[in-house]
Image (tube, rainbow, N blue to C red):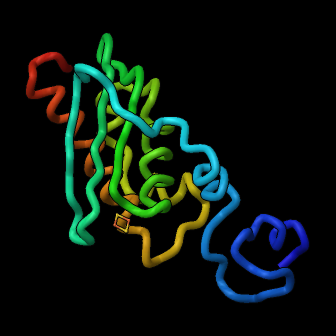
């Protein structure tokens, strides 16, 4: 492992050859989750409680079939916050159809390194976004 990769590896001591627990990008989202919060009268809204017992809630503002703004709340750990904020960042500005194509795999790839035992947090975040988008479509405003 080269020096720069070790510096990017925020969870390891210098010189440690173990698998990194998470990326610098994850640390960035932990320090500054920009879309944490609520929204009045969202165009799309969904809540899902995952098998781990944590709940994720998404609020969407959609205009002209494009996701303009997203806020979320969660009872989950900071990896859940990171996954939700990443999903929101990836989805804002996209069309509804594009938002429906944001999967757990997309989120994990975007975050460039996530602990194996928290990859389900990314699944919960993506699934909740999809449910909120479907709620919007069911209300008859989409596509
Ligand atoms: Fe439950 Fe992350 S630990 S969603």
Along the line of sight, which residue is nearer the eye, 134 or 22?
22
Q: Tell whether 124 sits left or right of 106.
A: left
In the rendered image, residue 56, in percent from the top left (x then y), is placed at 29, 51
- Residue at x 59% of width, y 50% of height: 29
Could you tell me which quadrant the N terminus lies in? Answer: bottom right
In the rendered image, residue 48, in percent from the top left (x then y), is placed at 20, 52
Residue 92 sits in quarter: top left
- Relative to 28, residue 91 above or below: above
- Residue at x 46% of width, y 53% of height: 81
In the rendered image, residue 78, in percent from the top left (x then y), is placed at 49, 60
Q: Tell whether 50 sits left or right of 117.
A: left
- Relative to 63, residue 125 above or below: below
Residue 121 sits in quarter: bottom left
- Residue at x 78% of width, y 64% of height: 8
Q: Tell whether 27 sits left or right of 13.
A: left
Along the line of sight, which residue is nearer the eye, 54 or 123?
54
Residue 95 sits in quarter: top left
The residue lying furthest to the top in this view is: 64
- Relative to 100, residue 77 above or below: below
Q: Tell whether 90 sits left or right of 50.
A: right
The residue lying furthest to the bottom in this view is: 17
Along the line of sight, which residue is nearer the eye, 64 or 7?
7
In the rendered image, residue 15, in percent from the top left (x then y), is placed at 85, 85
């Amino acid at each position: 492992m080269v020096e720069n990769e070790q510096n990017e590896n925020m969870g390891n001591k210098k010189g440690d050859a173990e698998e990194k627990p998470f990326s610098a990008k994850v640390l960035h989202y932990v320090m500054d989750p920009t879309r944490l919060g609520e929204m009045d009268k969202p165009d799309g809204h969904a809540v899902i409680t995952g098998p781990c017992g944590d709940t994720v809630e998404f609020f969407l503002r959609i205009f002209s079939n494009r996701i303009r703004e997203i806020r979320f709340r969660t009872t989950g750990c900071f990896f859940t916050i990171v996954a939700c904020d990443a999903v929101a960042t990836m989805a804002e500005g996209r069309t509804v159809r594009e938002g429906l194509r944001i999967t757990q795999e997309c989120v994990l790839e975007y975050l460039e390194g996530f602990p194996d035992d928290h990859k389900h947090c990314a699944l919960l975040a993506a699934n909740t976004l999809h449910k909120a988008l479907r709620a919007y479509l069911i209300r008859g405003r989409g596509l």
